[in-house]
Amino acid sequence: MNDMAGGFPPVSSLGDASVAANFRLLQDVDVKLTVEIGSTSLTLRELLALGEASVIELDRHANELLDVFVNGTLIGRGEVVTVGEKFGVRMTELVSPDKRDR
């Protein structure tokens, strides 16, 4: 395998100061974090029949961890918590880069 994959030198060959400077450049870039509690498939007929009191069953059990995505890439899993009067996610597991969906 070529050490110059993607045209960039491996991080181990870069100076620590250079890496730190690059991270400082990127640390204020906004990313979108999304938490998925589950999904399902519906026919158009089922979708059109939904009303205010409708319940949609999802493909995940109540005790399963939720998927956490950053810009559409799975980065980990967590559980729902409340923070004051808002929902939050407690990260319980991080997905290693080689096992992420891209």
Image (spheres, rainbow, N blue to C red):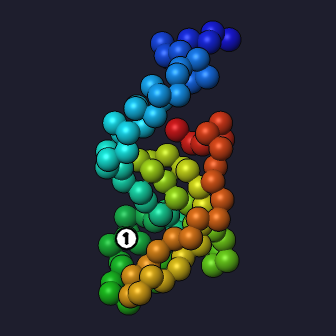
With respect to residue 11, does 32 lie above or below?
Answer: below
**Quarter of the figure with residue 99:** top right
Q: Residues within 10 Å of mark 1 (few under 14, many from 20)?
A: few
Q: Amino acid at mark 1?
A: Leu
Which one is nearer the viewer's eye here, 85 or 26? 26
Residue at figure coordinates x 52%, y 59% from the top left: 68
Rendered location of residue 65, percent (x, y): 63, 68
Residue 58 appears in the figure: no
Between 1 and 21, the one nearer to me in the picture: 21
Q: What is the x, y in percent for residue 9?
A: 53, 15
For the N terminus, the quadrant is top right
Q: Residue at x 48, y 83 (%)?
A: 82
Residue 77 falls in image quadrant: bottom right
Q: Is residue 99 visible?
A: yes
Using residue 97 as the reference point, say whether residue 23 is left or right of it: left
Query: What residue do we see at 32% from left, 73% from top?
Result: 48
- In the rendered view, tell whether residue 84 sits above or below residue 29: below
Q: Secondary structure at mark 1?
A: helix
Above or below, 102 against 2 in this view is below
Residue drawn 39% across the image and 82% down it: 86
What residue does disc 1 label? 47
Q: Is residue 40 left or right of residue 23?
A: right
Q: Quadrant of residue 23?
A: top left
